[in-house]
């Protein structure tokens, strides 16, 4: 469980919510195929120990305030494995999320001494926090989310701001910040390629 303040919202962001220091974002779906497995939950955090969980019923994805925030060029969106989340958000909300920071890409560029780039590994090493992934495979389409599900979902965004700060220092130290920014900029295109059926193809290969 987590001690964070968790708020549930149905179908959209509440009015008046702002993210001046950027917003950490994650999604929960019914599987890993965006064309088949619907978007159930979008988690958001401003990095202040609070998490906002937006729950979708699968019937409506209007969410005008959420869509406006995702497309706002003045708000940085921080993900872990942004490639999947950005594709899901494009598929169900029809929005190109920008600008983007991905802690998984940053980790792969900065932490070349390991092949462990999962969120649990990153939070454990860089922040000294142990995360539970017990609810990773659960029914996110349930009418009511359990307390364990809420805690799991919140933990996926609560630490991303702190991870970004650590990874930015490592990227700068190794002279790879420009590689990271270029990769982040390509992510919306990578997501559209995945949705177009090119998810298994390396378009840069011979």
Image (cartoon, helix red, strand yellow):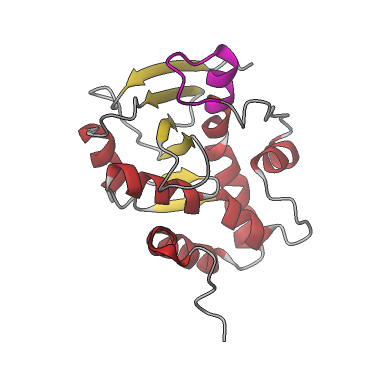
Q: Please identify the quarter of the rendering in which residue 141 is found.
A: top left
Looking at the image, which is closer to me, 48 or 64?
Answer: 64
Q: Please identify the quarter of the rendering in which residue 128 is found.
A: top right
Looking at the image, which is closer to me, 53 or 160?
Answer: 53
Q: The C terminus lies in which quarter of the figure? A: bottom right
User: Does the magenta segment cover residue 187?
Assistant: no
- The answer to whether residue 146 is visible is yes
Q: Which residues are magenta?
A: 139-153
Residue sitting at x 28%, y 51%: 73
Residue 185 as seen in the image, left or right of residue 179: left
Looking at the image, which is closer to me, 173 or 105?
Answer: 105
Q: The N terminus lies in which quarter of the figure? A: top right
Residue 18 as seen in the image, left or right of residue 205: left
User: Does the magenta segment cover residue 140?
Assistant: yes
Q: Is residue 54 above or below residue 206?
A: above
Work out which residue is located at the far right of the displayed protein and give it.
113
Q: Please identify the quarter of the rendering in which residue 12 is found.
A: top left
Residue sitting at x 24%, y 24%: 16
How many marks are shown on the rendered structure? 0
- The answer to whether residue 75 is visible is no
Residue sitting at x 72%, y 42%: 121
Q: Is residue 45 above or below residue 144?
A: below
Percent coordinates x, y for residue 104 in the rendering: 59, 52
Work out which residue is located at the far bottom of the displayed protein and give it.
206
Work out which residue is located at the far front of the displayed protein and give it.
36
Percent coordinates x, y for residue 145 in the rendering: 49, 16
Residue 2 as seen in the image, left or right of residue 121: left
Q: Is residue 115 above or below residue 55?
A: below
Q: Is residue 41 above or below residue 146?
A: below
Percent coordinates x, y for residue 8 in the rendering: 40, 17
Residue 140 as seen in the image, left or right of residue 196: right
Percent coordinates x, y for residue 60 in the rendering: 25, 30
């Amino acid at each position: 469980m987590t001690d964070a303040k968790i708020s549930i919202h149905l179908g959209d962001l509440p009015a008046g919510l702002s993210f001046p220091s950027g917003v950490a974002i994650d999604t929960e779906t019914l599987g890993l195929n965006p064309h088949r497995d619907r978007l159930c939950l979008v988690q958001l955090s401003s990095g202040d120990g609070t998490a906002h969980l937006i729950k979708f019923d699968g019937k409506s994805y209007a969410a005008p305030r959420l869509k406006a925030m995702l497309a706002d060029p003045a708000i940085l969106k921080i993900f872990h494995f942004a490639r999947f989340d950005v594709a899901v958000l494009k598929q169900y909300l029809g929005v190109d999320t920008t600008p983007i920071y991905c802690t998984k890409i940053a980790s792969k560029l900065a932490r070349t001494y390991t092949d462990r780039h999962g969120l649990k590994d990153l939070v454990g090493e860089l922040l000294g926090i142990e995360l539970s992934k017990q609810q990773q495979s659960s029914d996110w389409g349930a009418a009511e989310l359990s307390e364990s599900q809420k805690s799991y979902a919140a933990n996926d965004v609560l630490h991303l701001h702190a991870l970004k700060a650590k990874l930015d220092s490592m990227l700068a130290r190794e002279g790879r910040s420009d590689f990271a920014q270029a990769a982040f900029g390509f992510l919306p295109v990578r997501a559209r390629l995945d949705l177009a059926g090119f998810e298994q193809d390396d378009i840069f290969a011979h």
